[in-house]
Amino acid sequence: MDDIVKRYEGNPIITPAMIPGANAVFNSAVVRFEDRYAAILRVESKQGFQTMRMAWSDDGIHFDVLPGPILRLTG
């Protein structure tokens, strides 16, 4: 029986280098939405602040991270 979920050999898919000012990226959730993939990411800035970012992909592997956070986390 084939696995339903497979780990991509080219991980990580989204890296801090793809997001200006990012120190770390945590791939929080990816879902299929209509004919694309939507991702919500937790991003830690180099200053230690946490934000949530949105990214889109046509194939589930190559993502375009939208500029700017959709949510700033405080704590």
Image: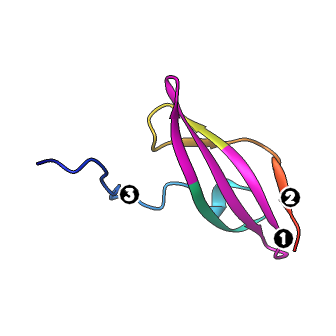
Are the residues at dot 2 and dot 3 in contact (C-beta closer than 8 Å)?
Answer: no
Q: Where is residue 20 in the image (x, y as percent from the top left)?
A: 76, 57
Is label 3 in a helix, a strand or a loop? loop
| Residues in magenta, as a range | 29-54
Amino acid on which disc 3 is placed:
Gly
Which residue is nearer to you in this view: 34 or 24?
A: 34
Mark 2–mark 1 Cα distance, whole angstroms, equals: 8 Å
Q: Position of residue 10 (x, y in %)?
A: 38, 57
Does residue 66 appear to the left or right of 12 in the view shown? right
Say which residue label 2 marks.
Answer: 72
Which image quadrant is residue 73 in? bottom right
Q: Mark 2 vs mark 3: which is more N-terminal? A: 3
Is label 2 in a helix, a strand or a loop? strand
The residue lying furthest to the left in this view is 1
Amino acid on which disc 2 is placed:
Arg
Q: Does the segment drawn in magenta span residue 42?
A: yes
In this view, 28 is above or below 40: below
Of the numbered discs in the image, which one, if any, rests on residue 10?
3
Mark 2–mark 3 Cα distance, whole angstroms, equals: 29 Å
Q: Mark 1 vs mark 3: which is more N-terminal? A: 3
Q: Which of marks 2 and 1 is in front?
A: 2
Say which residue label 1 marks.
Answer: 49
**Local crowd size for mark 1, using a 10 Å CA cut-off: few (<14), some (14–19), many (≥20):** some
